[in-house]
Image (spheres, grey):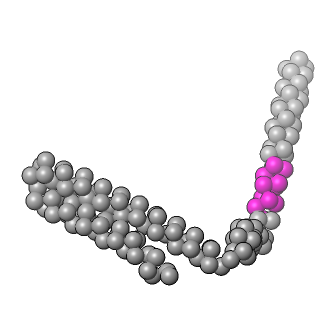
């Protein structure tokens, strides 16, 4: 009789633990449902969201370009010239490092690749200097 009462108490305690576990899993499931709902919303409306971002980004350019189209074109040309010149300088710098390391190691192939890279950087800088001729 006593052992029967102990078994009943233990089974009631196990039931309480199960109830706690199910409450936690239900809470996790509702959180997952919310996340899944948000994901479904984003998947269904991804084109609308992308269009809204593009519209927001282009609104600034439209307001800037409305003053004068030539001013915008000149600004783009100057920006292109500046950054392509910088890119050519970086290429020349890398070529100089390659040439110096080839000279240190007495490696003819690395020296020639370094000089070729320096010349390529110089060509990029020359093309950038002619940007005003291309976009005039």
Front residue of 63 and 21: 63
Range drawn in magenta: 29-40
Front residue of 38 and 69: 69
Q: Is residue 12 above or below residue 108?
A: above
Q: Is residue 103 above or below residue 12?
A: below
Front residue of 24 and 8: 24
Does 36 appear in magenta?
yes
- Residue at 72 percent of width and 74 percent of height: 67
**Is residue 44 in view?**
no
Front residue of 124 and 103: 124
Q: Is residue 12 above or below residue 122?
A: above
Q: How many marks can you see?
A: 0
- Residue at 13 percent of width and 47 percent of height: 104
Q: Position of residue 65 (x, y in %)?
A: 69, 74
Is most of the magenta stretch helix, strand or loop? helix
Name the image quarter holding residue 133: bottom left
Q: Is residue 63 left or right of residue 121?
A: right
Q: Position of residue 96 (x, y in %)?
A: 24, 55
Does 88 appear in magenta?
no
Q: Position of residue 124 (x, y in %)?
A: 35, 70
Q: Is residue 97 above or below residue 77?
A: above
Name the image quarter holding residue 7: top right
Q: Quadrant of the N terminus?
A: top right
- Residue at 35 percent of width and 67 percent of height: 125
Name the image quarter holding residue 74: bottom right
- Residue at 84 percent of width and 50 percent of height: 30
**Is residue 73 in view?**
yes
């Amino acid at each position: 009789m006593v052992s029967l009462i102990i078994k009943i108490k233990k089974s009631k305690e196990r039931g309480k633990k199960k109830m706690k576990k199910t409450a936690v899993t239900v809470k996790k499931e509702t959180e997952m449902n919310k996340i899944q709902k948000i994901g479904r919303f984003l998947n269904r409306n991804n084109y609308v969201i992308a269009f809204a971002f593009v519209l927001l980004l282009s609104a600034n350019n439209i307001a800037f370009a409305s003053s004068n189209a030539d001013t915008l074109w000149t600004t783009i040309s100057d920006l292109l010239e500046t950054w392509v010149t910088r890119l050519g300088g970086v290429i020349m710098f890398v070529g100089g490092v390659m040439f110096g390391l080839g000279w240190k190691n007495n490696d003819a192939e690395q020296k020639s690749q370094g000089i070729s890279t320096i010349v390529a950087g110089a060509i990029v800088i020359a093309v950038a200097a002619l940007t005003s001729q291309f976009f005039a």
